[in-house]
């Protein structure tokens, strides 16, 4: 189920579909991103839509750490982590690569698995060399 959810998330990002990304989260989800926490599906959709306005997403790939899926309390709550990467193209700019790491807790919601809590980050770019005087 974790693999299937990751594939759906990749597809939603590659289609630049903020509503489809948000639909993979529970209504009361919390997603901690580089700019702070997003509370609820509506806030997640709004933020992802803003990201897609700033840069078109493609080649989004989530990789799950094979040692990570773990039951948290009950079989209806699974924690996992991994890394992600993608290509982003601003409206009038050159495409650039981003990558980072993520951790999720997914829960069963009816017949589907949804992301309940998530944290993701962009791997920082190397620091620019210090100027010499």
Image (tube, rainbow, N blue to C red):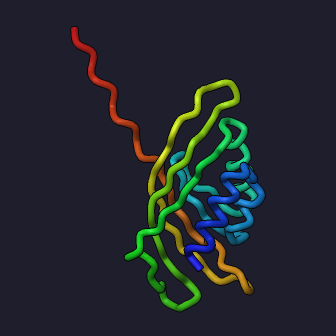
**Location of residue 107 in the rendering, given as x and y in whole percent from the top left corner:** 61, 80
| Residue at far top of view | 133
36 vs 92: above or below: below
Task: Name the side, left or right, on which 118 lies relative to 9.
Answer: left
Task: Name the side, left or right, on which 19 lies relative to 132.
Answer: right
Q: Which of the two residues, 55 or 45, is positioned nearer the viewer here?
A: 55
**Location of residue 19 in the rendering, given as x and y in whole percent from the top left corner:** 77, 57
| Residue at far front of view | 59
Q: How many marks?
A: 0
- Residue at image position (48%, 89%) is 73
- Residue at image position (48%, 84%) is 72
- Residue at image position (68%, 59%) is 11
Q: Which of the two residues, 106 or 83, is positioned nearer the viewer here?
A: 83
| Residue at far left of view | 133
**Location of residue 35 in the rendering, given as x and y in whole percent from the top left corner:** 54, 45
24 vs 21: above or below: below
- Residue at image position (69%, 67%) is 24
Pick the quarter of the image with the C terminus.
top left
**Location of residue 41 in the rendering, given as x and y in whole percent from the top left corner:** 72, 63
37 vs 26: above or below: above
| Residue at far bottom of view | 74
Pick the quarter of the image with the N terminus.
bottom right
Q: Which of the two residues, 4 or 101, is positioned nearer the viewer here?
A: 4
Task: Name the side, left or right, on which 63 lies relative to 113.
Answer: left
């Amino acid at each position: 189920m974790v693999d299937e959810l990751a594939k759906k998330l990749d597809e939603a990002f590659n289609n630049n579909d903020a509503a489809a990304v948000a639909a993979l989260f529970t209504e009361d989800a919390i997603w901690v991103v580089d700019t702070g926490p997003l509370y609820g599906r509506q806030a997640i959709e709004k933020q992802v839509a803003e990201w897609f306005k700033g840069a078109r997403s493609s080649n989004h790939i989530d990789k799950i750490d094979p040692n990570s899926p773990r039951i948290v309390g009950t079989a209806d709550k699974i924690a996992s982590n991994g890394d992600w990467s993608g290509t982003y193209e601003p409206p009038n700019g050159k495409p650039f690569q981003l990558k980072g790491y993520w951790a999720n807790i997914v829960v069963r919601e009816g017949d589907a698995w949804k992301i309940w809590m998530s944290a993701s980050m962009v791997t920082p770019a190397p620091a620019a060399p210090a100027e010499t005087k």
